Amino acid sequence: MASDRHTSISLLSRVAATWRTLGEGYRRFNAAAWSLPSLLLKLMLAVYFLFCIAFLALRFFVLPNIGQYKGEFEQMASRALGKPVTVARLEASWDGLRPHLELGEVVVRDKDGRAALNLPGVSATVAWRSIPAFGLRLHQLEIRQPDLDIRRDIDGKLYIAGLPIDLSAETDGQGADWVLLQNEIVIRDGRLRWNDDQRKTSELSLQNVNLVLQNGWRHHRFQLQATPPEKLAAPVDVRADFVHPFFAQRISDVRQWKGELYADLDNTDLAAWKTYFDYPFELERGSCSIRAWLTFDHAKLADFTADLRLSDVFARLRKDLVPLDLLEVKGRISAREEPSDEHEPGTPAFGMQGHSISLTDFSLKTRDGLTLPETTVSESYTPGKNGAPGTTKIATKQLDLNVLASFSKYLPLSTEQRQMLADFSPSGQLQDF
């Protein structure tokens, strides 16, 4: 009996101890649960007051006297660029609740002391998201009437605003990423100068350069307009609208972009551009107008459409060929890469995984009387799978084989291709082929 009584007392003691432990844990958890919002509230109040103090110090002490720091700003910019930088005016104000900076007559000089970059006016509105981002974020950056010099020296080295650019070096893309993180960047009435000491050509100047870049989290819009010399071409218009993946490691990696690109080039004198770059064939004269739309998807050509018009073109596509003297070429060119599960995203396939090309309402006239009436032709390629051969399909509504056979003398065909044409001697017309 005494043993049973002792066992019962010991069991009750353990139960009571366990109950007290649970009760104490509950009281501590309850106290912590009730104090957590209080701690968060206190922390938020502390952050708020620190922000207010920083805001007031910035408003009443730093920005009103920012002109006094112009010398330090010039020294800091010069060290960062490795080139002399001068600033004539540095002012600060407020755009609503956002700090706003104004810089006037900013000049960056090259190694020879020439003004490689001249910025008459720069305004920047700082976004408050710079604080959580731990970096500079701009609500808007506006650059007015910039004058930028791009130069290639006699040794082929490239300089932009006096800074050497190594095109073969790999970059981490941080500069481009920073640009795409800003809310809006605007360039108004700019000037771009290209000087090529290696080719010893006259300066090429693009006037009225206007650029607008608007960035969201993963959505970006871009528009560029520029006016080349009248003897070269009409004003150029380029636009783009694209997105990148969520949480991309490098948002400037174009291989991950999806979007559309539009370009409009009108009244371009092809021969006049020979001063600044070489064509892969001989060209004596010619005029070109093109309006193109390009849809891209992770380095894949999802769709391409171009309305093309050539006039008064005299060219020789290969030295051993008859010169090509065209009165006019016009029509629509379309191309696309077909989707494939075997294609690695971000790697150009150049149509090898499947493609289609078409000419719509395409026509040409030569000065010696050869005429190809408006015709529509399409070609598509599907690669083979599992040991099966690939297939190529060609379709046309109407095609004059006599004209094509006569036109072949102007084209840079191989010996085998010319022999095949001679063997087949194509003639006649194809209808709904």
Image (spheres, helix red, strand yellow):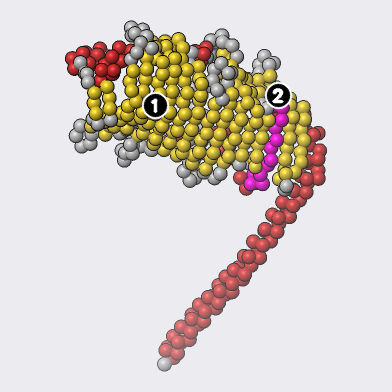
Instruction: Locate residue 307 relative to residue 149 in the image: left or right.
Output: left
Residue at the limit of the structure toward the top, as seen here: 320
Q: Disc 2 marks which residue?
A: 107
Magenta segment main secondary structure: strand
Q: Nearer the viewer, residue 110 or 311?
A: 311
Mark 2 vs mark 1, CA separation in Å: 47 Å
Question: Can residue 318 be spotted in the picture?
Answer: no
* Above or below, comparing residue 366 to residue 379 in the picture: above
User: Sequence order check: which comes first, mark 2 or mark 1?
Assistant: 2
Residue 125 in the magenta stretch? The answer is: yes
Instruction: Locate residue 198 relative to residue 351 in the image: left or right.
Output: right
10 Å crowding of disc 2: few (<14), some (14-19), many (20+): many
Question: Can residue 180 be spotted in the picture?
Answer: yes
User: SS class of the residue under badge 2?
Assistant: strand
* Above or below, comparing residue 13 to residue 282 in the picture: below
Instruction: Locate residue 79 relative to residue 419 in the image: left or right.
Output: right
Hey, which quadrant is residue 2 in on the image? bottom left
Answer yes or no: do the residues labelled 2 and 1 have beta carbons within 8 Å?
no
Residue 203 is situated, as x and y percent measured from the top left of the image, at: 60, 14
10 Å crowding of disc 1: few (<14), some (14-19), many (20+): some
Magenta segment range?
118-130
Say which quadrant the C terminus sits in: top left
Q: Disc 1 marks which residue?
A: 331
What's under tag 2, amino acid-wise? Answer: Val
Residue at 70% over, 35% down: 123
Hey, which quadrant is residue 76 in on the image? top right
What's under tag 1, amino acid-wise? Answer: Gly
Say which quadrant the N terminus sits in: bottom left
User: SS class of the residue under badge 1?
Assistant: strand
Instruction: Locate residue 255 relative to residue 112 in the image: left or right.
Output: left
Residue 167 is situated, as x and y percent measured from the top left of the image, at: 51, 22
